[in-house]
Amino acid sequence: AQTVTQSQPEMSVQEAETVTLSCTYDTSESNYYLFWYKQPPSRQMILVIRQEAYKQQNATENRFSVNFQKAAKSFSLKISDSQLGDTAMYFCAFMSTGNQFYFGTGTSLTVIP
Amino acid sequence: DAGVIQSPRHEVTEMGQEVTLRCKPISGHNSLFWYRQTMMRGLELLIYFNNNVPIDDSGMPEDRFSAKMPNASFSTLKIQPSEPRDSAVYFCASKKTGFNTGELFFGEGSRLTVL
């Protein structure tokens, strides 16, 4: 079975600083997708970034980038130049070839002015 | 394009009452998922449909929960009878079937409170 672990329940960062959220996963599959979703207080789940496992290059979306270490089964999210609007719960997710999604327990990020 | 549409956004009910949550997936998406979110357990997959057929319902807590997808544009999650421990936010999400077809799109969730 696939599992996704986020070991940091809460984190905080000063505005304009950089923060890294950790995620590890366990799978026996060789190809899969990994995602980071953001859930602000409005509770809407919003896709931040995604990575396909067979692609070696780390995905980047503006201020958001990932550090994907396939052998270590690690998928961390780096947020640069943190903004107040980045305050949210962040979920790491794994999608198997069977089209099923597995989510971590989330990391609550607070950006401090 | 409209996103995933869920109703109601909020529901408060008494223990023992029947609750029906509704979901309209994005047009053209033929995979539909129901999740439950609580502080204690995070996001739990309840059931997953593909082309209106339930593929995995192993997350459905017990017989009080049932889900249907009578057609490609509508799904319901029913709780009967409801209990206080069912209080949670219930999300519906959809995507195109297939491995390379992108991410999961979520509705805004239905917050259920059972008194």
Image (cartoon, coloured by chain):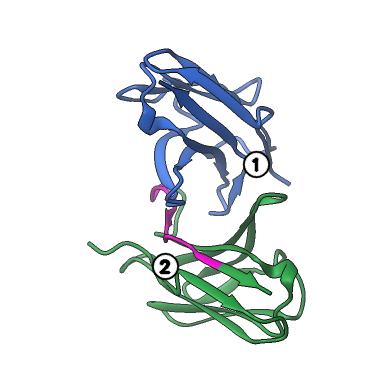
Chain colours: A blue, B green
Q: Which residue is mark 2?
A: B30
What residue do we see at 46% from left, 49% from top? B99
Looking at the picture, does residue A41 appear above or below residue A108? below
What residue do we see at 57% from left, 34% from top? A108
Label 2 neighbour load within 10 Å: few <14, some 14-19, many 20+? many
Chain of the residue where label 1 is placed in the rendered structure: A
Residue A35 visible within the image: no
Image location of residue B109, percent across then percent down: 48, 62
Same chain, labels 2 and 1: no
| Image quarter (top left, top right, bottom left or bottom right) of the C terminus of chain A | top left
Residue B71 within the segment the image draws in magenta? no
What residue do we see at 55% from left, 48% from top? A97
Gap in angstroms between the C-alphas marked 2 and 1 = 26 Å
Name the chief secondary structure element in magenta. Answer: loop
Q: Quadrant of residue B62?
A: bottom right
Amino acid type assigned to the residue bearing label 1 in the image? Thr
Amino acid type assigned to the residue bearing label 2 in the image? Asn
Residue B103 within the segment the image draws in magenta? yes
Highlighted magenta segment, given as a residue range? B100-111
Image location of residue B13, percent across then percent down: 61, 80
